[in-house]
Amino acid sequence: MTIDPSADRPVYKQLADLIRARIQSGEYRPGQRLPAENDFVAEYGISRDSVRRAMAVLRGEGLIVTELRGSRVREVGEAVTVSISPGTQVAARMPTEPERKQLGIAEGVPILIITEPDGETRKLPADRTIIEASKEQQG
Amino acid sequence: MTIDPSADRPVYKQLADLIRARIQSGEYRPGQRLPAENDFVAEYGISRDSVRRAMAVLRGEGLIVTELRGSRVREVGEAVTVSISPGTQVAARMPTEPERKQLGIAEGVPILIITEPDGETRKLPADRTIIEASKEQQG
DNA sequence: GACAATTTGTACGTATGTATG
DNA sequence: TCATACATACGTACAAATTGT
């Protein structure tokens, strides 16, 4: 697949599509290191700016994580199942940056907000949490 | 409050903090139009690049929406409560761009993924959905 | 309808900083 | 020490869509 600068779709979205497809097809596997930004620059003849935008899109989707040594496909960690009893509510949203740091959550990962019938709330990282409705009272 | 280019915290994060604080304090209210990018450029003597990065942070947090005519504070729409019966699981993640367009979801909004005991799944926009655990069978 | 102004979107460039190997 | 690679931040230019004249 290639990138067409004259196409309707922006260059950076074309690159994001391309990398996303490679992740979803398994060509880039969880934990695997992506090529460096400059590799994409050289391969497709586009600016580093466009490559970085594409990476930002994929980070925002939670598909990759970027560190100083490069980007890699996110590995889905073990998820803990949290049982909730009848009457408990669950919502989700993106954390603000302070929340993200405080809760130790990666970029592109939402938080689940659990509100018990008594008003108590908990915030949990969505990439490590599965909610399951239970019949009986439980934590 | 002002912005210090020589501070440890990047300029764009300082601006994001500043605007976030104004939103959370109510100085910028839901639905209200934010100043244009160039207004921040002029007010703080920073580049448009930095302003746009700050906006991207806030969009990613779901706090603002940006259209061609400007950015505004997101209005939290009416949320529908979805009851789930025992055994049903709930997860959340960010949608990919195709999912986002297909489901008509704004940037910075996660999706809730509901998996029924029979394996059926539903994807719902997290900004318009509250999950509630019920005692009995229900949709 | 035509035209200009406003505002965001995209895309290129350069330079410097910081952390890793 | 040096090379690599990402992060930040400045600049420019033009495109596209909306709004107002």
Image (spheres, coloured by chain):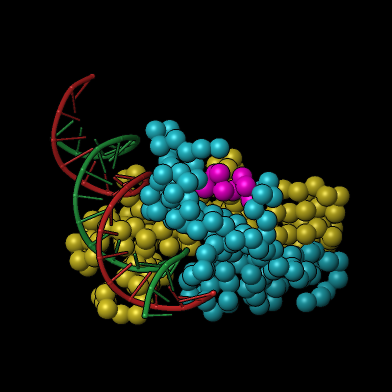
Chain colours: A cyan, B yellow, C red, D green
Q: Main secondary structure of the magenta part?
A: helix
- Please tell me which residue is depicted at 27% across the width and 58% down the height of the picture: B48
Residue for point 46% across, 56% down: A37
Residue A133 falls in which quadrant of the image?
bottom right
* Residue B109 visible, this orientation: no
Residue A110: image quadrant is bottom right
Q: Determine whether A37 is above or below A24 in the image.
A: below
**Is D21 placed left or right of A88 in the picture?**
left
Magenta-drawn stretch contains A121: no
Q: Is residue A138 above or below residue B125?
A: below
In this orientation, which residue lies closer to the viewer: D18 or A24? A24
Residue D13: where, in percent of width, then height? 21, 43
Residue A32 seen from this side? yes
Please provide percent x and percent y for residue B75.
Answer: 45, 55
Q: Residue at x 70, y 73 (%)?
A: A116
Total tally of numbered discs in the picture: 0
**Within the magenta stretch, is there residue A22?**
yes
Q: Quadrant of the image for the C terminus of chain A?
A: bottom right
Q: Which residues are magenta?
A: A16-23
Question: In the visual, does B114 lie left or right of A57?
Answer: right
Q: Is residue B111 left or right of residue A134?
A: left
Residue D7 in the image, given as x and y percentages of width and height = 42, 68
**Percent of width and height locating residue B72:** 37, 55
